[in-house]
Image (cartoon, rainbow, N blue to C red):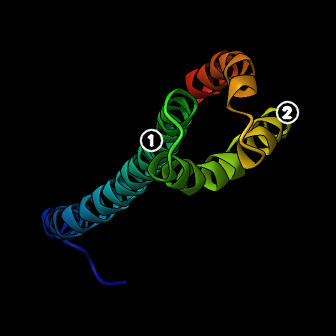
Amino acid sequence: MPKLDLSFTITAIVALIALISPIFTTLLNNRHQLKIKKLELAQKQSENTVLYKRNIFENYVSALSKLSAHPSNETLEEYGKYYSLAYMYLPESLQGDMSKINSHVLNHNWENISPLFENLIPKIYKVLQTM
């Protein structure tokens, strides 16, 4: 059986560990950085979605407010642009209220819009707060 020099064996083991350790550390670090980047992208996507929906709801409320105050072709067109978007993103519980308001808009019953609209605004506000 050949004799192994203990100092050479220890030196070889230390050299091997010194070679493998940075590679292993780099792999772990890269994996961690990838997970962090994915979380950051998901957060950014979520923020963008919330801002997009908030903008739609605010524009819908603004357009309906303008329409009920000063009905014209321009305000009706602006309302129509945001109605379907807001309808799509609001919960089903509020879609019924929006449909009622929209039926009054389509029938040009401007005086009946304000009470329904005033009832809808706090509900939309609650939806925005939960986003």
> Picture quarter containing residue 85?
bottom right
| Along the viewing direction, whichever of 13 and 85 lies nearer the viewer | 85
Q: Does residue 120 appear left or right of residue 93 in this picture?
A: left
3D distance between C-alphas at marks 1 and 2: 20 Å
Q: Nearer the viewer, residue 8 or 19?
A: 19
Q: Mark 1 or mark 2, which has the lower sequence index?
A: 1
Q: Name above or below for residue 66 compared with residue 43.
A: above
Instruction: Sort mark 1 into few (<14), some (14-19) or many (20+) by Cα contacts within 10 Å.
Output: some
**Picture disc at residue 18:** none
Position of 102 with respect to 9 (left or right) is: right
Residue type at numbered disc 2: Ser
* Residue at the image point whose x is 14% and y is 69% from the top: 8
Residue where numbered disc 2 is placed = 93
Percent position of residue 16, x then y? 22, 70
x and y, in percent, of residue 6 in the image: 20, 63
Would you name the residue on which mark 1 appears? 55
Secondary element under disc 2, as helix, strand or loop, is helix
Position in image of residue 12 (x %, y %): 18, 70
Identify the image quadrant of the C terminus. Answer: top right
**The N terminus - image quarter:** bottom left
**Camera-side residue: 93 or 84?**
84
Amino acid carrying label 1: it is Asn
Question: Which residue occupies 59% across, 20% down?
Answer: 125
Marker count (numbered) = 2
In the displayed structure, does residue 99 sit left or right of residue 29? right
Q: Secondary structure at mark 1?
A: helix
Q: Are marks 1 and 2 in contact (CB under 8 Å)?
A: no
Q: Image height check: is 17 above or below 80?
A: below
At a point 27% along the width and 58% down the height, the residue shown is 25
**Residue drawn 83% across the image and 36% down it:** 100
Vertical comparison of 72 with 24: above or below:
above
Q: 26 or 73: nearer the eye?
A: 73
